[in-house]
């Protein structure tokens, strides 16, 4: 039998717990908005703006409810994010033994494809429809779409990513947020809770220099917005556009295609950080189509920043980074005559994928293994490359050169950081693969130099001249893989001169 004193004590404890739980619930429910970007009632807002909320306390993203954007004049629903839909897959898709390369090259048509006129997921090639249920957004005219995170939370800051190209110039919008979209937040309701008006018109067509600023003070808020504005397939150097990117953090997945004669220049390399959490798992290739291996295959969607079927680009003073592990490029480029200077590329496996002729000057590339991948040709001049595994897996054919490094610094971060490898890859190899090192600094590179080179790659061209350590002392090459030929300064002087000439390597 309970004594009155014990019962009273238990009742008091129960009341204390009830009060504590009530207070905690009130605290969670009272998380409120400190600031909005664009501010409520703002005008002259860029059409590519993200919607940013700064909360009174750290916040997390919920799994239900809608973020909706309406045209304030007409009441029309313009865009909606359904938070019950997962962002994207979290496990690799099953291997499909029936997957094949497309029987004809992938076609890069010049079309104005956006979320406003095309259903995201529409096949752009011969691949089948993907009916999986994930968030999907058409970016850069790629109708198959990309999986994406509708809201990204960083402490008290929540960034809402609308579908691309849904807002128009000269319109007023209002935003509603359902309860449950943000944990512990009651949401935003009504036509006056969060309104903004976009700029009256786009930059003038004759304006060849456009500015990107994350704070909304430029012509665009995002690199993607600027690239969407620039016309496809410009005819000549005289038509070149210059995109100036101000210092800032740009957390966005960037993909554009069919661009020519565009310069993207950051205010400073370390000050402009363009990054996103993307990889082969999150945005895989179609299950029924092979990709990435040969020219003309279905485009890869796994890079944080991709320039696809683009030529005559110039990119300077930028940091391009994937926030994921796995097959996750910081930069993927397909095209010809593309020039990169003072770019910092951060990836994991396959940190940089370069298909087509590229010149790399004073760049830094940090990766986890197979750090430089692609079909080439690539000419690296005074670049610094770090890797935890093999620095490269070269896949060039006899049509062009492979990877040539002149006065570069290759720094291994583990004992497994070989210069490269050429294993059989699903029954095939790259007999014309080419890697040339001229006057390079090698640090923490295994004595053999190369990792596994299978029989089908025994005709590869692997050349090395005057490799030295960070103190300038010659590297011991006596234990190099027998396929890697050491060039003689007198006997091979002509060959050394040719490989030191970017025009000879690249053809331009």
Image: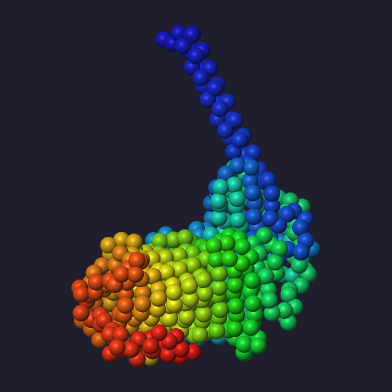
**Spot occupied by residue 122 in the image (x, y as percentages of width and height):** 53, 76
Left or right of 337: which side holds 110?
right
Left or right of 37: which side holds 310?
left
Left or right of 490: which side holds 160?
right
Q: Residue at x 36, y 77 (%)?
A: 439
**Spot occupied by residue 485 in the image (x, y as percentages of width and height):** 25, 82
The answer to whether residue 258 is visible is no
Q: Residue at x 55, y 51 (%)?
A: 154
**Spot occupied by residue 274 in the image (x, y as percentages of width and height):** 55, 64
Numbered circles on residues, count: 0
**Spot occupied by residue 281 in the image (x, y as percentages of width and height):** 41, 65
Q: Residue at x 54, y 68 (%)?
A: 318
Which of the two residues, 392 or 179, is positioned nearer the viewer here?
Answer: 392
Which of the two residues, 327 or 393, is positioned nearer the viewer here?
Answer: 393
| Quadrant position of residue 300 | bottom left
The answer to whether residue 242 is visible is yes
Which of the two residues, 508 or 207, is positioned nearer the viewer here?
Answer: 508
| Quadrant position of residue 28 | top right
| Quadrant position of residue 268 | bottom right
Which color scheme is applied? rainbow
Q: Residue at x 67, y 70 (%)?
A: 211
Tell me the quadrant of the picture where the N terminus can be found: top left
Which of the two residues, 349 or 48, is positioned nearer the viewer here?
Answer: 349
């Amino acid at each position: 039998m309970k004594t009155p004193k014990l019962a009273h004590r238990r009742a008091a404890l129960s009341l204390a717990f009830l009060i504590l739980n009530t207070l905690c619930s009130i605290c969670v429910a009272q998380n409120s908005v400190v600031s909005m970007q664009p501010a409520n009632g703002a005008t002259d807002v860029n059409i590519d703006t993200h919607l940013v909320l700064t909360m009174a306390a750290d916040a997390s993203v919920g799994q239900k409810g809608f973020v909706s954007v309406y045209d304030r004049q007409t009441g029309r629903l313009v865009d909606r994010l359904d938070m019950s839909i997962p962002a994207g897959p979290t496990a690799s898709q099953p291997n499909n033994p029936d997957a094949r390369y497309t029987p004809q090259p992938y076609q890069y048509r010049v079309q104005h494809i956006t979320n406003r006129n095309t259903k995201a997921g529409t096949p752009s090639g011969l691949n089948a429809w993907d009916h999986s249920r994930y968030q999907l957004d058409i970016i850069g005219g790629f109708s198959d779409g990309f999986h994406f995170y509708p809201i990204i939370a960083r402490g008290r800051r929540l960034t809402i990513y609308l579908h691309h190209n849904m807002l128009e110039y000269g319109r007023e919008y209002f935003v509603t947020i359902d309860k449950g979209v943000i944990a512990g937040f009651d949401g935003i309701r009504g036509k006056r809770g969060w309104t903004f008006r976009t700029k009256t018109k786009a930059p003038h067509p004759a304006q060849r220099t456009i500015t990107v600023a994350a704070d909304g003070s430029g012509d665009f808020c995002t690199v993607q917005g600027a690239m969407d504005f620039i016309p496809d397939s410009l005819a000549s150097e005289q038509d070149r556009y210059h995109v100036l990117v101000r210092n800032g953090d740009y957390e966005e997945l960037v993909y554009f295609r069919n661009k020519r004669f565009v310069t993207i220049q950051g205010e400073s390399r370390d000050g402009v950080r363009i990054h996103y959490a993307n990889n082969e798992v999150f945005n895989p290739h179609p299950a029924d189509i092979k990709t990435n291996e040969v020219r003309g295959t279905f485009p890869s969607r796994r890079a944080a920043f991709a320039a696809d079927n683009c030529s005559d680009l110039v990119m300077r003073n930028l940091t391009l980074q994937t926030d994921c592990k796995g097959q996750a490029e910081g930069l993927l480029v397909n095209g010809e005559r593309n020039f990169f200077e003072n770019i910092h590329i951060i990836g994991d496996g396959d940190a940089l994928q370069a298909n087509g002729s590229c010149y790399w000057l004073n760049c830094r590339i940090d990766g986890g293994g197979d750090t430089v991948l692609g079909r080439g040709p690539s000419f690296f001049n005074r670049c610094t490359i770090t890797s935890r595994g093999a620095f490269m897996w070269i896949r060039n054919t006899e049509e062009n050169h492979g990877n040539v490094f002149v006065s570069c610094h290759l720094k291994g971060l583990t004992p497994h950081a070989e210069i490269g490898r050429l294993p059989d890859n699903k029954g095939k190899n790259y007999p014309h693969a080419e890697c040339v090192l001229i006057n390079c600094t090698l640090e923490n590179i295994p004595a053999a130099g190369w990792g596994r080179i299978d029989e089908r790659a025994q005709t590869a061209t692997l050349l090395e001249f005057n490799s030295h350590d960070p103190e300038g002392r010659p590297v011991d090459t006596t234990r190099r893989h027998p396929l890697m030929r050491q060039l003689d300064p007198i006997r091979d002087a002509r060959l050394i001169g040719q490989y030191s000439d970017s025009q000879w390597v690249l053809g331009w």
